[in-house]
């Protein structure tokens, strides 16, 4: 039986440490209250030790298939027009602790997700300054974080964390964030600059960016093709493709796993839902393990690329029992959370039903 791993942390609203080095920390999802996640409770995902960067000497290089290679200081980026986007960011492995049998990877519960106001420079503004070659197709972000991959298949020696995005996405809505909720990024959250890729899983939001490389060929880096990839079927053949857009998903924040709720009362079940580049159209709740469903009330905070809160007043059973609560989301395109894990997703894109067991006492 799955148990709540962080009762004390949830009560305090502090981050739960999944690994200390590299730092991987999540918000206790049962403490969810704010549409905008406070900085001190926004999850932290690191693959290697956090690099220590001096903002005064740091430079951002734009290179590759560009007419003019450029370098920008932090002061120069801050002097450019600043833009703010509200976007939900979710680790691609969020919810991994629900998978059975257990799989490799950080064992996230439900809190490797957050919603924030990100401010900085639009990527397209830098690309326009550099000028693009006509055959450019992708933009690669390379961070300052580096280390050796521990398990095969792996390249020899140290590598830096890097991911790419299609040029169309790069020109549309990607932000090079300098601030998180109005405050400069901390080292843990990517100081001095990180990418924010609205609607995509967090693995695309490269932190500590030092190089932006415009490419005329598809990027084949480790974190693009070996890790953070999943199987799909093309013409009946399994094909490995990079993870990109978040899937429609609803999570229950309260009650928490194995919480005791009083019998014969009304309990406000609540949570959040998100749907990548789409919007949440409906969230349903089952209190009997998926046998029957009720439509929840959605909060009036619908926004592109941001999560949406929901709630439902649950009349708890009159007698003590054990109940299984499940939430499922449907997006504006009509996509609904699947009831079961999709095996080809491996240990990522965990958007199947996530049951919360509670004791009615």
Image: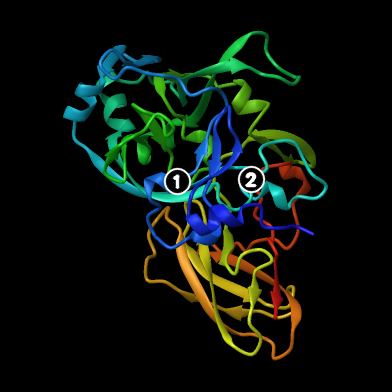
Residue in view at x 70 percent, y 64 percent? 355
- Who is closer to the viewer here, 4 or 230? 4
Q: Is residue 211 visible?
A: no
- Return the residue nearer the eye: 239 or 323: 323
Q: Where is the C terminus found, in terms of image quarters?
A: bottom right
Q: Say which residue label 2 marks.
A: 108
Q: Residue at x 43, y 18 (%)?
A: 213
* Mark linked to residue 42: 1
**In the image, residue 57 above or below residue 336:** above
Query: Where is residue 187, by image quadrant?
Result: top left
Q: Is residue 136 above or below residue 319?
A: above
Image position, residue 218 (x, y; %): 56, 23
**Residue 70 numbered mark, or none:** none
Q: Position of residue 336 (x, y in %)?
A: 62, 64
Quick one: which residue is furthest to the right in this view? 101
Give the x, y percent position of residue 107.
68, 42
Sequence-wise first label, 1 or 2:
1
Q: Crowding near pointer 1: few (<14 within 10 Å), some, many (20+)?
A: many
């Amino acid at each position: 039986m799955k148990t709540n791993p962080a009762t004390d942390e949830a009560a305090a609203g502090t981050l739960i440490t999944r690994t200390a080095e590299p730092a991987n920390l999540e918000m206790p999802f049962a403490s969810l209250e704010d549409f905008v996640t406070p900085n001190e409770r926004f999850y932290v995902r690191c693959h290697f030790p956090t690099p220590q960067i001096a903002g005064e000497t740091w430079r951002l290089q734009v290179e590759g298939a560009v007419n003019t290679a450029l370098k920008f200081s932090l002061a120069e980026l801050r002097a450019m027009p600043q833009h703010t986007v509200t976007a939900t960011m979710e680790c691609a492995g969020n919810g991994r602790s629900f998978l059975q049998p257990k799989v490799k990877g950080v064992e996230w519960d439900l809190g490797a997700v957050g919603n924030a106001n990100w401010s900085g420079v639009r990527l397209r503004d830098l690309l326009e300054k550099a000028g693009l070659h006509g055959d450019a197709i992708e933009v690669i972000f390379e961070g300052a974080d580096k280390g050796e991959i521990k398990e095969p298949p792996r390249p020899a020696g140290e590598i830096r964390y890097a991911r790419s995005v299609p040029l169309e996405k790069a020109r549309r809505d990607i932000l090079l964030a300098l601030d998180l909720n109005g405050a400069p990024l901390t080292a843990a959250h990517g100081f001095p600059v990180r990418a924010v890729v609205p609607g995509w899983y967090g693995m695309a939001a490269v932190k500590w960016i030092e190089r932006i490389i415009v490419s005329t060929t598809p990027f084949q880096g480790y974190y693009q093709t070996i890790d953070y990839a999943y199987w799909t079927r093309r013409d009946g053949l399994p094909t490995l493709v990079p993870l990109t857009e978040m899937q429609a998903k609803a999570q229950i924040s309260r009650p928490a796993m194995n919480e005791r709720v009083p019998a014969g009362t009304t309990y406000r079940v609540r949570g959040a839902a998100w749907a990548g580049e789409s919007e949440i159209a409906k969230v349903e709740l089952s209190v009997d393990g998926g046998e029957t469903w009720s439509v929840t009330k959605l909060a009036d905070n619908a926004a592109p690329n941001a999560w949406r809160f929901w709630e439902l007043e649950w009349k708890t059973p009159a007698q003590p029992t054990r109940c299984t609560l499940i939430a499922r989301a449907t997006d504006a395109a009509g996509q609904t959370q699947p009831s079961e894990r999709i095996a080809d997703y491996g240990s990522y894109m965990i958007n199947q039903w996530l049951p919360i067991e509670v004791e009615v006492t």
